[in-house]
Amino acid sequence: MTIQPAKLSDPAVRAFVTAVNAHDREGFLETLAPGATMSDDGSDRDLADWIDREIFSTHGHMEVDKETRGGRALVARYSNDTWGEMRTRWSFTVEDDGRISRFETGQA
């Protein structure tokens, strides 16, 4: 059963998913702490390049199926124009100021 983005427990993760699904690059970047990092399938990636390629230039979309760790870990069906739909896991590190300093994703 899909969890609507507005119902996600963690405010930073909620804003992240909402921005991805709205194709709101500016709003997405506002969810991230300065110097934020990320990894995909266990390998660190260049964040700016990755979000352009995997989210914003390819119409990325997340359908969240499950959340754990107080909303900071998700299992989602992720789709974009490049890869189609796949089952993915997401893990977020959220700082005291409410911004995401790191996220990790990969196939679930």
Image: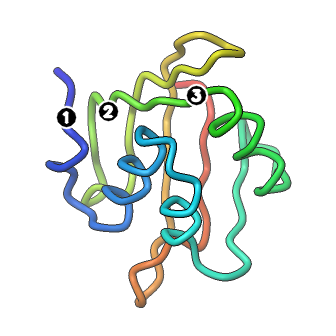
Horizontal side of residue 8 vs 40, given as left or right? left
Vertical comparison of 35 with 63: above or below = below
**Residue depth check, mark 1 versus mark 3: number of the one nearer the observer:** 3
User: For mark 1, what is the residue?
Assistant: 3
In the image, what residue type sits under mark 1? Ile
Provide the secondary structure element on which disc 1 rests: loop
Horizontal side of residue 24 vs 47, given as left or right? left
Residue 1 found in image quarter: top left
Question: According to the image, what is the colour scheme of the structure?
Answer: rainbow
Vertical comparison of 11 with 79: above or below = below
Say if mark 2 contacts mark 3, CB within 8 Å. Answer: no
Cα distance between the residues tagged 1 and 3: 20 Å
Q: Residues within 10 Å of mark 3 (few under 14, many from 20)?
A: some
Cα distance between the residues tagged 2 and 3: 16 Å
User: For mark 3, what is the residue?
Assistant: 59
Residue 38 found in image quarter: bottom right
In the image, what residue type sits under mark 2? Val
Where does residue 41 sit, x and y in percent of width and height? 72, 35
Q: Residue furthest top?
A: 84
Where does residue 85 sit, x and y in percent of width and height? 53, 12
Q: Residue at x 68, y 71 (%)?
A: 36
Of 22 and 63, nearer the camera is 22
The tag on residue 64 is: 2
Q: Residue at x 51, y 28 (%)?
A: 88
Which one is earlier in the sequence, the residue at label 1 or at label 3?
Answer: 1
Horizontal side of residue 45 vs 57, given as left or right? right
Say if mark 1 contacts mark 2, CB within 8 Å. Answer: yes
